[in-house]
Image: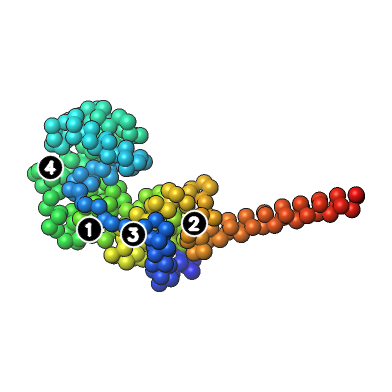
Amino acid sequence: MGRDGTLTIVKARRLVVRVCNALERKYGAREMPSPRPPLEELLLGVLAQGSSERSASRAYRRLTQFFVDLNEVRVSTPKDIEAAISDLPNAEDKAYAVKETLSHVFNKRNEISLGFLEEASAAEARRFFAEMEDTDRGVIARVMLFSLGHPAMPLNAQVDRVSSRLGLIQGDGDSSESRARLEKIVPSDRMFDVHSLFNEHGRKACLAARPKCSRSVVRSYCRTGKKLTASSRKTRSRSKSKSSSRSRSRSTRS
């Protein structure tokens, strides 16, 4: 166990495989969806921050319907972009982010496309994205994994929560450090499996406020699950003890 309470890298790697296999038996094997074009995935990532994937997809569709093409989005005002994605939270900030993203791509490539990355190596793609300093690294990770098929770990609230409760990362750690640690721990060919399975488990069982540990197939590996399950058992035991005492007391009086 590390000083920060996380597992060592070697132990964490073993645990990831066991947990992934257990979650796969529960939720089913994962299959990587057909990749989207890198620029589309990048914009979806920007729109999805603080929102659901479904809402982000709707907002992206509205952009493509409202404007002739993405180049028109680039040259439009943030207010016009905001009007097209107004249903999203923080629509104003996201409108600026969309415009800045498209402007960066155009300034670097003289076109509104990241198609060249589909033939680039992982190192070349990372060098290109390293220059996008204002773009969240989690958004970059999703493009690397989902669109380009390179090992990377998109870190959302569910993946972060499940990983920290398992002791794989620090619960209150920096997101960049957590992502880097998971990318060391998770086998490169299981990145998508772990992201998808942890995400589903985080939505269905490992909830933020009231986790359903009794339904979790990985509670025996989970420090939070063990703690809450033990606490629940103690509560039930005390309740039974009190009930038994009251029964004996009534029996004595009668």
Disc nearest the viewer among 2 and 3: 3
Residue 85, numbered label: none
Q: Nearer the viewer, residue 229 or 247?
A: 247
Mark sitting on residue 112? 4
Instruction: State which quadrant residue 70 falls in.
Output: top left
Query: Residue 204, position in %: x, y?
Result: 45, 49
Query: Badge 2 is on which residue?
Result: 216
Q: Residues within 10 Å of mark 2 (few under 14, many from 20)?
A: some
Please name the residue shown 25% across and 48% down the image. 133
Reading the image, the residue beneath label 3 is 29
> For mark 1, what is the residue?
149
Nearer to me, 12 or 231 = 231
Sequence-wise, the earlier of marks 4 and 2 is 4
Query: In front: 154, or 55?
Result: 55
- Judge from the rendering whether residue 252 lies leftward or rightward of residue 71; answer left or right: right
Sequence-first disc among 3 and 4: 3
Q: Which of marks 3 and 1 is nearer the N terminus?
A: 3
Question: Disc 1 or 4, which lies upstream in sequence?
Answer: 4
Q: Is residue 16 visible?
A: no
Q: Which of marks 2 and 3 is nearer the N terminus?
A: 3
Sequence-first tag of 2 and 1:
1
Front-lying residue, 39 or 57:
57
Q: Nearer the viewer, mark 2 or mark 1?
A: 2
